[in-house]
Structure formats: C-alpha cells, structure tokens
C-alpha cells in the first residue's frame, strides 16, 4: 500500500481573531496559526515574507465567514547557487 503525502504549499491565509484581538496567519490546509499580529498590515507583511522565503505563492485575506476577500501573489526568492571552486 502506497501512501501519498500532499505537497506542502507556501500559501498563507490571514483572518481576524476577535478572541485574541488580532490577525492570524495560517498556512493553507492547516488549522492552527503559525504567526500572529495585532494589525492587518503587519500580518500581511509577515505572511508575504513567509511565502517569499518558501518559494512564492499567494497571501489570502479571509472575512469572518471564511470567504476570501483579497488575494495577492508573491514571488519567491531565488538565491544563486554557490559553485565549488
């Protein structure tokens, strides 16, 4: 029996959490927040940095009902490979 793992994606979802009083940053497909910020702008900035480091993807902002209200594509960082001398 072969078990396939789903490919992890760099996409991040941002949603407001009233209980905590701030914005959660959640990896797409996950349930728990990987980061948190008090402001929406700060959460978007952190999410973009995470996605950029992981090779690019999307940052999606969701409303209280879970509907995507805003999406932004983020390009990844491409570091040049070091060659052996």
Image: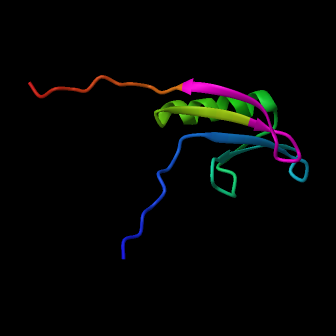
Which x, y percent locates residue 69?
A: 81, 33
Which x, y percent locates residue 49?
A: 58, 30
Asked if the stretch drawn in magenta spans residue 70, the answer is: yes
Q: Main secondary structure of the magenta part?
A: strand
Which x, y percent locates residue 21?
A: 88, 45
- Res 31 → quadrant: bottom right
How was the colour assigned to the protein in this rendering? Answer: rainbow
Which span is picked out in magenta? 61-74
Q: Residue at x 55, y 33 (%)?
A: 57
In this rendering, is residue 77 above or below 54?
above
Q: Residue at x 52, y 30 (%)?
A: 52
Quarter containing the N terminus: bottom left
Q: Is residue 12 left or right of residue 64?
A: left
Q: Is residue 72 left or right of residue 20?
A: left
Asked if the stretch drawn in magenta spans residue 85, the answer is: no
In this rendering, is residue 53 above or below 28?
above
Q: Residue furthest left?
A: 85
- Res 35 → quadrant: top right
Q: Is residue 68 left or right of residue 72?
A: right
Q: Residue at x 77, y 27 (%)?
A: 41
Quarter containing the C terminus: top left
Please count the marks in the image: 0
Which x, y percent locates residue 28?
A: 63, 47
Q: Residue furthest front?
A: 1
């Amino acid at each position: 029996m072969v078990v396939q793992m789903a490919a992890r994606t760099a996409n991040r979802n941002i949603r407001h959490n009233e209980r905590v009083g701030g914005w959660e940053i959640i990896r797409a497909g996950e349930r728990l927040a990987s980061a948190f910020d008090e402001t929406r702008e700060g959460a978007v900035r952190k999410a973009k940095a995470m996605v950029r480091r992981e090779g690019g993807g999307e940052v999606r902002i969701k409303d209280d009902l879970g509907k995507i209200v805003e999406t932004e594509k983020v390009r990844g960082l491409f570091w040049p490979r070091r060659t052996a001398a």
